[in-house]
Image: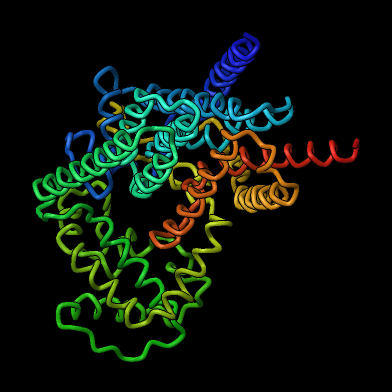
Amino acid sequence: MMRMQKHYRYFCLAGFTMLIQFTIFKYFYPFPNFMQDSYNYLRSAYENIDANLWPVGYSKLIRFVGFFTHSATVLVFVQYFFYHLCALYFFFTVLDLRETSRWVRGIIFAFLFLNPAILYLSNYITSDVYFIGISLVWISQLFRLVYEPSRWLLLAHLVVLILAYTVRYHALIYPLISVTALVFCQFSVRVKVGSILLIIALIAGFMFYTTSQTEKVMGTRQFSAFSGWQMANNAVYAYAHMPERPPLKVPERFGAVHHRVTAYLDSLQHIPMARRPDGPLMAFYLWDPYSPLQPVAGAVNIADNKVHLQQMAAVASLYNDYGKYLISEYPWAYFRYYLLPNFFQYAYPPSENLVVYNDGRDTVWRVAQSWFHYSANKVFTRSDTKEMALFGYYPLLMVLIIFLFVSGWIAYYVVGGPSFAELRFRYALRLGTFYWIVHYGFSVLASPVVLRYQLFNMILGVTFGVLLWELVLRSLFANREQ
């Protein structure tokens, strides 16, 4: 009964703070925040297509809300509200892992529900907050399956897993983690094997359907055109940062693209690296209109140009092979100029779009004006946006969170934490640690890491960091009293 009362108080407090924050925020920011990705999602929703450069799960959410209303404010609220429901499920799951003090619950609650990054990111027309919410439910279900081995919960987990898969390619690692967790859950061998086979079947079915829809929509049969471009972007970035690039005789099929790349890099030789457009570790070669990889140089509104995206899809397979070729020719340069910087960028991710409103513009693209029924393409804020500079400190916060978690993890084992911590907590800690290790490796290899990709990891880091240190301090004080 006490636990139910405690949960109810937190539920009410989360709802109250959500409404207050949203109301004040929307006064100062009556329009959503848009980036290049936003227009791609909106076009996918507008045309109701089932394949694009990114998974279309978020576009389906936009379309679902659009069935009732095309109000941008309602869409933003739905995103923010959905996150809060998922965060509450995660929060109550964490409280069930072990007994915690009020200050620990307060820290976790504040980071989940009073975090300005979540509020501002919810105002973006992107899949980020939606995916964070799904991820919170996904990992909470894995935590619960160890002490609530219900078949209904397992079935719900499979649904959430496939939902995550339709929203963000980062979910590619989720089946691996789910399967690993299921092996140690208290189910019969038959249920475990059946669940794993069902996961494989669902993922395979989704990939087959997406591949066929990609061929239908974009003219090429492939699961993800985006992955080929990402491979080329990463490889060309490393190649561009080599101090010297000896002449390279490439296979004939790569001749045209390699000629454009080398000609572009030669044109940048007189510009210091710090001032070059491809200087920061970002997706410059993927999205910049003047990237030598673009099929049409200087094309505008790339993410909202169906013909251009079809042209990008047409060369995606070639670019995937070209990227792999450059990496095979210069593996050390790829490690030195892409993998190693991205390894550290994971711990100190650039704030990117979180520190700017609407990419610094006061207009939106036509697809946004059309979908949200704006009378004009102008947007405005009642804020001078100077408070967004706060997110410039979040990379440092990420470093502190990693230190909090790693130091707490080490101290936990030094004091013999596994010998007295609750079983459910030990399981959740191992699972959370396993997730972070796998995610670290996948993120570094996949694409340049930015801050908005790291908020879910920051939530896990803060949660387990304070839980670990509370256990450690309790153990130390108990030993001192003895």
Res. 315 visible in picture: yes
Residue in view at x 15 percent, y 46 percent: 208
Q: Residue 334's image quarter? A: bottom left
Question: Which residue sits at x=52%, y=57%?
Answer: 346
Instruction: Tell me what residue is drawn at x 30 percent, y 67 percent.
Output: 232
Instruction: Give the quarter of the image for residue 166.
Output: top left
Q: Of 131 and 239, which appears nearest the observer?
A: 131
In the rendered view, tell whether residue 12 sits above or below residue 349.
Answer: above
Q: Is residue 246 above or below residue 199?
A: below
**Considering the image in quadrants, where does the N terminus appear?**
top right
Q: Position of residue 22 (x, y in %)?
A: 52, 23
Q: How is the image coloured?
A: rainbow
In-image side of 380 versus 104 (left or right)? left
Relative depth, front residue between 435 and 287: 435
Q: How many marks?
A: 0
Quarter of the image for the C terminus: give it: top right
With 247 as the anchor, is 445 left or right in this view? right
What is the residue that sits farthest to the bottom in this orientation?
A: 247
Q: Give the quarter of the image for residue 235.
A: bottom left
- Compared with residue 278, is residue 420 higher up or lower down, i.e. above or below? above
Q: Residue 374's x, y, as percent?
A: 31, 28
The foreground one among 223 and 427 is: 427
**Point 28% across, 47% down: residue:** 54
> Is there any visible trace of residue 123 in the rendered image?
no
**What is the x, y in percent for residue 104?**
70, 31
Residue 165, percent across and down?
Answer: 31, 41
